[in-house]
């Protein structure tokens, strides 16, 4: 069973990154953070497809900002979470 604390930690990293973004990038990060928070609040496990899309979106955003450390941290936490998701 994947650890929902990893989703919460990823969301927290994204929220920290949002402090250094605005406009479209901030909107995209807010959307990802909201999806993670909703999953945790509902007790849902995110599937591989959803996680892959979120990780890809984070990679795209990371490439567009100067300091992407928090984005990389969030992406890594999603990768760790994904290791325990059933299926492939």
Image: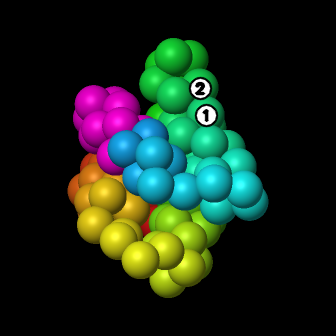
Dot label at residue 46: none
Q: Is residue 67 magenta?
A: no
**Picture layout, residue 38 above or below residue 56:** above
The Cα atoms of the two marked residues, 2 and 1, are separated by 6 Å
The residue wearing badge 2 is 38
Q: Quadrant of residue 30?
A: top right
Judge whether residue 79 can be spotted in this image.
no
Q: Which residues are magenta?
A: 1-13
Left or right of 27 on screen, residue 45? left
The residue at 39%/62% (across/down) is 71
Residue 28 spot, x, y in % from top left = 67, 55
In this rendered view, identify the residue nearer to me: 79 or 10: 10
Colour convention: rainbow
Dot label at residue 34: 1
Label 2: which secondary element: helix
Q: Is residue 3 magenta?
A: yes
Label 1: which secondary element: helix
Residue 19 spot, x, y in % from top left = 45, 46
**Picture layout, residue 19 above or below residue 39:** below
Q: Nearer the viewer, mark 2 or mark 1?
A: 1
In this rendered view, identify the residue nearer to me: 31 or 3: 31
Residue 12 spot, x, y in % from top left = 36, 37
Whether the residues at callouts 2 and 1 have beta carbons within 8 Å, the answer is yes
């Amino acid at each position: 069973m994947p650890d929902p604390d990893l989703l919460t930690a990823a969301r927290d990293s994204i929220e920290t990154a949002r402090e250094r973004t605005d406009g479209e990038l901030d909107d995209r990060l807010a959307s990802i953070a909201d999806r993670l928070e909703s999953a945790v609040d509902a007790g849902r496990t995110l599937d591989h497809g959803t996680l892959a899309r979120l990780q890809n979106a984070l990679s795209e955003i990371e490439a567009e900002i100067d300091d992407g450390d928090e984005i990389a941290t969030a992406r890594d936490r999603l990768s760790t979470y994904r290791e325990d998701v059933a299926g492939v």
